[in-house]
Amino acid sequence: MISRITIHNFQCHKHLDLDLGRSTVLSGNSNSGKTAVLRALYWVLFNTPSGDAYVSYWAKNKTKFKADEYTSVIVEVDGHIIERKRSNDINGYIVDGKVYEALRTAVPDDVTKIFNLADASVQRQMDAPFLLAATPGEASQYLNSLAGLECVDEILSIAKRNVADT
């Protein structure tokens, strides 16, 4: 479970420290930074967006970071500390003190394992409701994979073959 998010120089946030509970609601007026918090979390989880459009104006001049400035999102999850950081010196992840370079949109395996995310774990702001936008076949295929029913299909196929051979 994510217990804390610390954001530094990301979009509209100069510095933000959020302690999270089992259920946390972000509320506020339009343009107050709610979506920026979600984007900061996506930056850690999926290494997107790329480029530097997310870097706050406090941290950069037109071509690079100002001296001693950086953009960082730190997420504490299940006793691990994961930081996604970008500065003049580093563009990567720091996972429990170990540094990983960010390569294109790849996310280090350690980050993926710690968060234990699947494709259906995160729904973005404008995504269609989960499985309601899928065809019935796509929805049943996904649910079958969750329940491990593909092995049942394989076993039934083998049994049917054995009956036919007999």
Image: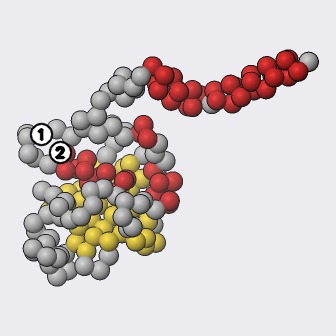
**Location of residue 133 by image quarter:** top left
**In x, y percent, where is residue 28?**
12, 40
Is residue 25 visible to us here? no
Instruction: Specify whether 165 is left or right of 105.
Output: right
Which residue is depicted at the point 25% across and 74% down?
Answer: 87
Q: Is 43 situated above or below 57?
A: above
Disc 1 and disc 2: Cα gap in Å? 7 Å
Q: Amino acid at mark 1?
A: Gly
The dot on residue 62 is none
Q: Amino acid at mark 2?
A: Lys
Q: Is 27 situated above or below 42?
A: above
Q: Secondary structure at mark 1?
A: loop
**In x, y percent, where is residue 84?**
33, 64
Q: Which residue is mark 2?
A: 34
Which residue is depicted at the point 17% across and 61% down?
Answer: 53
Q: How many marks?
A: 2
Which residue is depicted at the point 27% across and 61% down?
Answer: 50
**In x, y percent, where is residue 70?**
22, 72
Is residue 157 visible to us here? yes
Q: Which residue is mark 1?
A: 28
Which residue is depicted at the point 19% across and 45% down?
Answer: 35
Q: Is 86 situated above or below 118?
A: below
**In x, y percent, where is residue 121?**
41, 39
Instruction: Specify whether 73 is left or right of 107.
Output: left
Which quarter of the figure is the C terminus placed in? top right
